[in-house]
């Protein structure tokens, strides 16, 4: 029996995928409200195809509980933020999940950490907890690391098709875990050491962060030079060995803005590029605000309440607002005492989470003169005609009309 611990953005699709493919699995989360929601037929976030997968998994008997249950394999999928000052991984949620399963796990159980962790986390934080508990690693319990790679917005497809990495202390355990993931994963699954798997995951997200930072820095250079950064990137990418990503209003979500810090925290004297990239990306919301005020001056808009931010989520077509550039911009404006006056709209966010939030595109557009596009949701791409007559500052490069301001 498999027990997935942590039923958030990664744990939930994973348990549903396992269940729908006939693996005997239960899900545990200490959040009783979330468990109730899931047991009562409702999902906790939106993702294409998740609803159908949920129905299938439920038909296979998948259930959710706040209890830690006896199992042969635990898949731990809980948050791993970083510590604000040291920038090192905050492993407290993972440690606490491991502590919770140790009293109930079957002899010889495998504890698989799926959460992203910095290289060395299992050695530093997890092994001592197990030893303290009086269990012998490699006999009473085994350890593995199976970092996820799925992208919100395309989770189901990527769960099924992406290659994966599994780190384990020995090959037999690695193969055992590989078999479980193979129940649904059609990609190649590479088995390696725990340290290598830990490092690989962080390296992947850091690569993306650095590439985006490069695009963001180019956007700023091109603006100074009166050049179109998108044209430059498009032409440069025609080179067979160049693949620059897109500039944007900042890097949000719970992965890319966090994982590179793990490396900076652990290797401060060896991470100049990684740290600089983080800082460039973190400075983008502030840069976009400075550009908004440039556009306001140029267009004679004096009243910030005539400005509308389109998009609150951290990227297109997801409902996740964690670390979103828009929220960062709003809190910066609030510090400058004008935050509550900007109008905000996002079709993916049903709840009111910020002041002056609209829930109807037409009403929102009617209430503003300048629309700042911060997220390239499908909705706005399909309703470009509604932007006619508006001043537009497009940070996602989706508007091709004349007169639009770009990054
Ligand atoms: N962004 C840009 N320009 C780009 C691409 C992205 O500004 O060209 C911004 C997005 O708007 C967003 C942020 O970066 O604010 C991050 O979005 P993302 O789509 O790059 O990544 P995530 O955080 O949704 O998912 C990443 C993925 N990692 C990689 O692509 C290397 C995913 O595969 C991981 O599973 C996930 O992190 C994770 O959980 O670690």
Image (cartoon, rainbow, N blue to C red):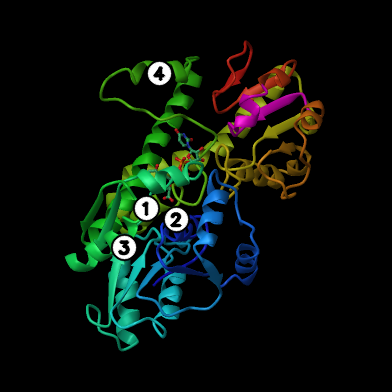
The earlier-in-sequence mark between 1 and 4 is 1
Give the SS element for disc 3: strand
Mark 3 or mark 1: which is in front?
Answer: 1
Check contact, mark 1 vs mark 2: CB within 8 A: yes
Distance in Å between CA atoms under marks 2 and 4: 37 Å
Apparent side of residue 162 relative to residue 281 in the rendered image (left or right) = left
Q: Residues within 10 Å of mark 2 (few under 14, many from 20)?
A: many
Give the SS element for disc 2: helix
Distance in Å between CA atoms under marks 1 and 4: 36 Å
What span is in magenta? 368-383
Looking at this view, is 238 or 157 the one in front?
A: 157
Distance in Å between CA atoms under marks 1 and 2: 7 Å
Task: Find disc 3 in the rendering and name its residue.
Answer: 145
Residue 81 seen in the figure: no
Residue at the top extreme? Answer: 402
Q: Residues within 10 Å of mark 1 (few under 14, many from 20)?
A: some
Task: Find disc 2 in the rendering and name its residue.
Answer: 17
Task: Find disc 4 in the rendering and name its residue.
Answer: 234
Q: Which mark is residue 184?
A: 1
Looking at this view, is 210 or 192 the one in front?
A: 192
Mark 3 or mark 4: which is in front?
Answer: 3
């Amino acid at each position: 029996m498999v027990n997935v611990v942590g039923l958030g953005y990664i744990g939930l699709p994973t348990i549903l995928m396992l269940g729908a493919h006939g693996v005997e699995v239960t899900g545990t989360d200490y959040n009783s409200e979330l468990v109730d929601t899931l047991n009562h037929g409702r999902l906790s976030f939106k993702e294409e195809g998740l609803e159908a997968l949920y129905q299938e998994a439920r038909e296979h008997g998948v259930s959710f509980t706040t209890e830690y249950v006896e199992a042969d394999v635990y898949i731990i999928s809980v948050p791993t933020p970083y510590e604000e000052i040291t920038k090192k991984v905050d492993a407290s949620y993972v440690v606490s999940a491991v502590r919770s399963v140790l009293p109930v796990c079957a002899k010889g159980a495998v504890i698989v950490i799926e959460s992203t962790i910095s290289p060395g986390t299992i050695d530093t934080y997890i092994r001592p907890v197990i030893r303290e508990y009086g269990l012998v690693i490699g006999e009473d319990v085994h350890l593995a690391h199976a970092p996820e790679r799925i992208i919100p917005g395309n989770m189901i497809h990527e769960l099924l098709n992406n290659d994966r990495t599994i780190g384990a202390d020995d090959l037999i355990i690695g193969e055992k875990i590989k078999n479980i993931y193979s129940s649904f994963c059609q990609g190649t699954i590479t088995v390696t050491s725990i340290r290598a798997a830990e490092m690989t995951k962080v390296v992947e997200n850091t690569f993306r962060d650095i590439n985006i930072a490069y695009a963001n820095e180019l956007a700023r250079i091109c603006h100074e030079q009166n050049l179109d950064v998108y044209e430059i990137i498009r032409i440069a990418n025609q080179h067979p060995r160049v693949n620059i990503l897109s500039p944007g209003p900042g890097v949000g979500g719970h992965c890319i803005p966090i994982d590179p810090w793990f490396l900076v925290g652990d290797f401060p004297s060896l991470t100049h590029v990684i740290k600089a990239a983080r800082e460039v990306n973190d400075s983008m919301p502030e840069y976009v605000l400075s550009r908004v005020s440039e556009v306001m001056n140029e267009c004679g808009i004096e009243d910030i309440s005539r400005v509308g931010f389109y998009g609150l989520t951290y990227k297109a077509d997801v409902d996740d607002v964690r670390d979103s550039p828009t929220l960062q911009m709003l809190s910066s404006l609030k510090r400058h005492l004008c935050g509550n006056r900007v109008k905000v709209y996002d079709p993916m966010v049903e709840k009111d989470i910020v002041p002056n939030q609209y829930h109807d595109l037409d009403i929102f557009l009617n209430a503003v003169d300048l629309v700042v596009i911060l997220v390239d949701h499908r909705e706005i791409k399909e309703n470009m005609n509604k932007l006619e007559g508006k001043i537009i500052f497009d940070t996602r490069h989706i508007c091709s009309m004349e007169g639009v301001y770009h990054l």
